[in-house]
Image (tube, helix red, strand yellow):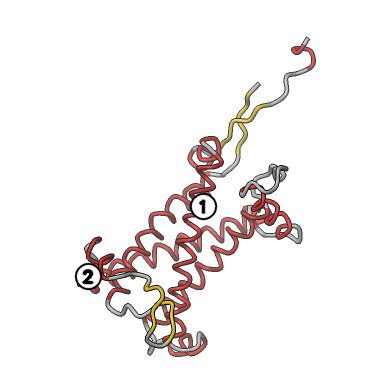
Amino acid sequence: MKRLVEKHPLAIRWFHWINFPVLSLMIWSGLWIYWANDVYRLGWGDTTVLKFFPKSFYEAFDIPFKLAKGMAWHFVLMWVFFVNGLLYVLYTAFSGEWRYLLPTRHSWREAVQVTLHDLGLRKAAPSARKYNGAQQIAYSAVIVMGLGSLLTGLAIYKPTQLAWLTTLLGGYESARIIHFVLTLGYVLFFVVHVAQVVRAGWNNFRSMVAGFEVVDTAEPASKAK
């Protein structure tokens, strides 16, 4: 017997589906900005082991010479990102959704179990509930990352007007590095998140679109005879 079970409120779904394309476009426009001062690499001295974006990457995606356009898009989207994030935090705080999202003292241990299960190293599946320990940690971390991106973005956007913030973050170069690392964190989160959604299947994806899941329930004893 199948029945519908509500999972995600309408507000959470709206915040999710607004944030996904906005953050994706911010990363894309950020590449237009980063192209103009492409300095980060893995290596030492004059030796480069890995350059994050080679010249061929920029040319393949037609990114070069779009600094002004990238800045214009980035700063407009920044406010959409900020407002959407603020409303999301306020909603979770006043609706009580934070009780499902905030990690508990058991979340870290459960996150390890979830990871081992996803890698096929643990047979027992994690307990079924709205958000498991790994999701609680990941989703809470993304909120903190969003705040970090906003503050570091403002620090490198207005380093003179917001000199106190830039100084607090260790200076312009430090704020820019943090901003860049947080962006890499979003990309990693996207990859893992999409992989998990695909692995979880249509029922899980539908819950973020329609707000409900279809679950199997045991037949009543009277019907089973």
Q: Residues within 10 Å of mark 1 (few under 14, many from 20)?
A: some
Which quadrant is home to the N terminus? top right
SS at badge 1: helix
Residue under label 1, please give it: 193
135 with respect to 35 (left or right): right
Going by the numbered disc 1, the residue's amino acid type is: His
- Out of 154 and 171, give the one closest to the viewer: 171
* Snapshot quadrant of residue 103: bottom right
Q: Relative to residue 154, is residue 222 depicted above or below?
A: above
- Out of 66 and 94, give the one closest to the viewer: 66
- Out of 198 and 52, give the one closest to the viewer: 52
Residue 64 is tagged as 2
* Snapshot quadrant of residue 133: bottom right
152 with respect to 112 (left or right): left
Residue drawn at x 56%, y 61% is: 89
Residue drawn at x 72%, y 44% is: 127
Residue drawn at x 51%, y 52% is: 193
Going by the numbered disc 2, the residue's amino acid type is: Pro
Q: Relative to residue 23, is residue 179 depicted above or below?
A: below
In the rendering, at what x and y percent does residue 42 appear?
43, 77
